Image (spheres, grey):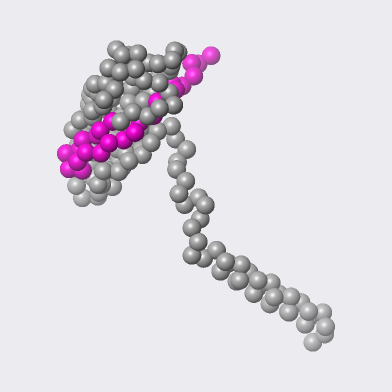
Amino acid sequence: MNRLKIRLCATSAGLAACGVILAGCGSGQISQTATQQAAVNGTAAQAKDIALRNVHLMAEQTSDFLQPGATVPLLFVAANNSVEAGDTLVAITSDVGTVAVTGNGAIPPGGALVVGPVGEGAEAMGSARPVVAEVTLTEPVTNGLTYNFTFDFAKAGKVTVAVPISAGEPAPE
């Protein structure tokens, strides 16, 4: 063999060894993105097999506070992680207002319950069944704070979630 081929083989073997060593440096480490939350308006919670996602109040705030008597929609998705047993949303309660839920709160096995204003895309979620939840405020609320809401499911039980307010969509021009 000539010197060029020997150098090429030695360089290739050295680069391969460096790749193996560098790959080993990251093993057993926690990645920086492993604990990142989804980039959505709301918060998330878990009640046994029911996963609550993107839970938030949607309100356009024009003054310091949304005053008592105002009605604002509560939006969220409740996904059933069980493929064997369905569940049902029984009630939602809060210290800041009365929550009225209309529609069928059943969550089929492996399915989802989409709760949001009619016409906001809830119907387009395939097997998901749209339901509407409206909160009539009894206390003043404002953006930047969170408010406790307790979700009660027939099988999964109760879970309390700190719910933020998300500004409504901008008006079309």
Q: How many marks can you see?
A: 0
Relative to 133, does residue 172 appear above or below in the rendering? Answer: above
Choose top left, top right, bottom left or bottom right for residue 119: top left
Image coords of residue 75 (percent x, y)? 34, 28
163 or 8, nearer to the observer: 163
Image coords of residue 9 (percent x, y)? 73, 79
> Is residue 152 in the magenta section?
yes
The reply to whether residue 129 is in sight is no
Magenta range is 149-173
Relative to 16, does residue 92 appear above or below in the rendering? Answer: above
* Most distant residue in the left direction: 154
Relative to 57, does residue 19 appear above or below in the rendering? Answer: below
Residue drawn where x is 38% and y is 36% of the image: 43
Image coords of residue 81 (percent x, y)? 28, 47
Q: Quadrant of the N terminus?
A: bottom right
Looking at the image, residue 47 sits to the left or right of residue 38; the answer is left
143 or 58, nearer to the observer: 143
> Is residue 153 in the magenta section?
yes
Looking at the image, residue 23 sits to the left or right of residue 9; the answer is left
Residue drawn where x is 25% and y is 47% of the image: 48
Residue drawn where x is 29% and y is 12% of the image: 69
Looking at the image, residue 112 sits to the left or right of residue 33; the answer is left
Image coords of residue 166 (percent x, y)? 42, 26
The reply to whether residue 160 is in sight is yes
Residue drawn where x is 34% and y is 33% of the image: 162
Q: Main secondary structure of the magenta part?
A: strand
